[in-house]
Amino acid sequence: MRHYKFIYIIGITLLLLGQSGCDDEFLDQKPDLSQAVPNTLADCQALLDNYNTMNAGYPDHGEAAADNYYLTDANYNSLYDNGLEIQESKNNYSWHPDGEHVNQWGNPYKVVYNANLILSVLDKISSEEPNYNTVRGSALFFRAFAYYHLAQLFCKPYSAATANTDPGIPLRLTPDPNVKSTRGTVQQVYDQIVGDLSEAVSLLSVDVTVKSRPGKAAAYAALARTYLAMEDYENAGLMADECLTLQSTLIDYNATSAMPTATTVSNSDTAPSFMRFNAEVIFQAITINGTLSQNMAQIDPDLYNSYTADDRRKTVFFGEGMEWWGDPNGIIGFRGNYDGTNSAAQFMGLATNEMYLIRAESYARAQNTALAMADLNTLLAKRMVPPYVDRTATTANDALVQILTERRKELIFRTLRWTDLRRLNQDPQFAITLHRDMNNITYTPLQPNDLRYTFLIPTKQVIDLTGMEQNPR
């Protein structure tokens, strides 16, 4: 199929990302694109359906730098990076100030390039063509989805007070490699994301044939996630509500036959608990295959113990005593991946449980305690052993605390914890300090609002080639 030829173009374009002209020796080595450039809607749809590029390989270093798990010394020492310097994953885990994140940067820009290539083709096709709106809306969605996840790593946390001056990431809006990349501002990045997704909402249909393709609900869900990161809680709630109007199904963790029925899990119960494309999934996407597999990541004991005995998530999400690395004692591994696998590639797409929690948080922050708790109870009723008794809250802040507590427990390993830490650290009530201890070394704690919450842009692959500004340390 023709779309496989595009991989070569993508690789070339990424190497040229940010170049302003053709003076560099490498730029003279240009491929013959005459047989590879798409020119029909069918070509564009084929490019969008390249799952390995468009739906897989999104950044996971934020989740890997967060506090939901720990590594034993043996697991930490075994970390490796295919094709990269061995220290990348280790530096990320220990929050090394000079850590590099090459694939975390490059893979999402493959998505951006494909989206821009498709949009450039659409400029030459009549908007009256069947499926034109779907293809354009999908390209806009994917570009925004990639930019959102890049922003969570390589931009400072969004702050309305400083977003117009904080440096953003390069906004590539054309497939032309000769257009110079500049960083712009954080505000420009989020404006682009919101603009792309808002147009996508107007173009995409409600029904989708497969969940690896975005529909209208996915665009609303991505907007809700984006506004939450911006601390625009009113709009986050509105977008979550629009999404839930279109798709609101929650899995009953008590009724699904594929889930364990016992209150404890034996060593053999390491199979994933969920099917890929399950009923809660709105849009399917997964991370890079990193350090967060069962045989590496061991759940933080305090987090694990926060799940009560009548909480079905304790057995659905986790397996106790799993015999990894020859040490079955006390090991707790995660098996609640909505991608339906035990691999280190975790589901980080969009799902209805996230939308209920976003809407609940929005209600709580708007002082609407009753509606906030109604959403939380709707979710928990599907998670707790029956009979479930609705929770109550004495104040809106009490509701908010409960919602944020359940958000961490419900959305574990979705790449959301890092963004939550970044935004919540700006509020002294929820700010926390993270710690790492390995090989008898205590690493410098990650304080709230630490500069290390913003990753360095790859030096050799981007900064040295383009001359753009590096993030401070």
Image (cartoon, rainbow, N blue to C red):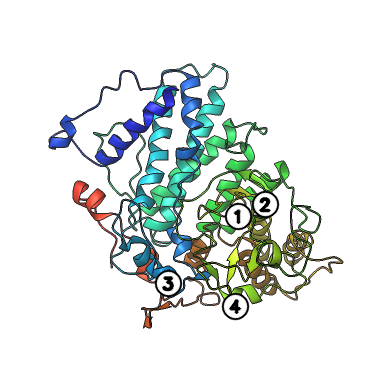
Q: Position of residue 311 (x, y in %)?
A: 74, 68
- Of the residues shown, which amino acid type is indicated by label 2? Phe
Q: Position of residue 268 (x, y in %)?
A: 66, 62
- Mark nearer the N terminus (4 vs 1): 4
Residue at point 39% right, 48% down?
188
Q: How dense is the environment of label 2, judged by Cα within 10 Å: few (below 14), some, or many (20 and up)?
A: many
Residue under label 1, please give it.
337
Question: How far is disc 3 from disc 1 in space, using C-alphas?
Answer: 24 Å
Question: How far is disc 4 from disc 2 in space, using C-alphas?
Answer: 24 Å
Q: Is residue 160 visible?
A: no
Residue under label 2, please give it.
274
Q: Nearer the viewer, mark 4 or mark 2?
A: 2
Q: Are dots 1 and 2 in contact, CB under 8 Å?
A: yes
Q: Position of residue 216 (x, y in %)?
A: 62, 37
Q: Point out the image quarter for the N terminus.
A: top left
Circle 3 SS class: helix
Residue at point 38% right, 40% down?
110
Left or right: 179, with 116 as reference point: left
Residue 382 falls in image quadrant: bottom right
- Depth check: 323 or 434 in front? 323
| Location of residue 201 with respect to 73 vertically, above or below | above
Q: How dense is the environment of label 3, judged by Cα within 10 Å: few (below 14), some, or many (20 and up)?
A: few
Question: How far is disc 4 from disc 1 in space, using C-alphas?
Answer: 20 Å
| Location of residue 19 with respect to 270 vertically, above or below | above
- Mark nearer the N terminus (3 vs 4): 3
Q: Which mark is residue 74?
A: 3
Circle 1 SS class: loop
Question: How far is disc 3 from disc 4 in space, using C-alphas?
Answer: 21 Å
- Of the residues shown, which amino acid type is indicated by label 3? Ala
- Mark nearer the N terminus (1 vs 2): 2
Q: Nearer the viewer, mark 3 or mark 2?
A: 3
Q: Which mark is residue 302?
A: 4
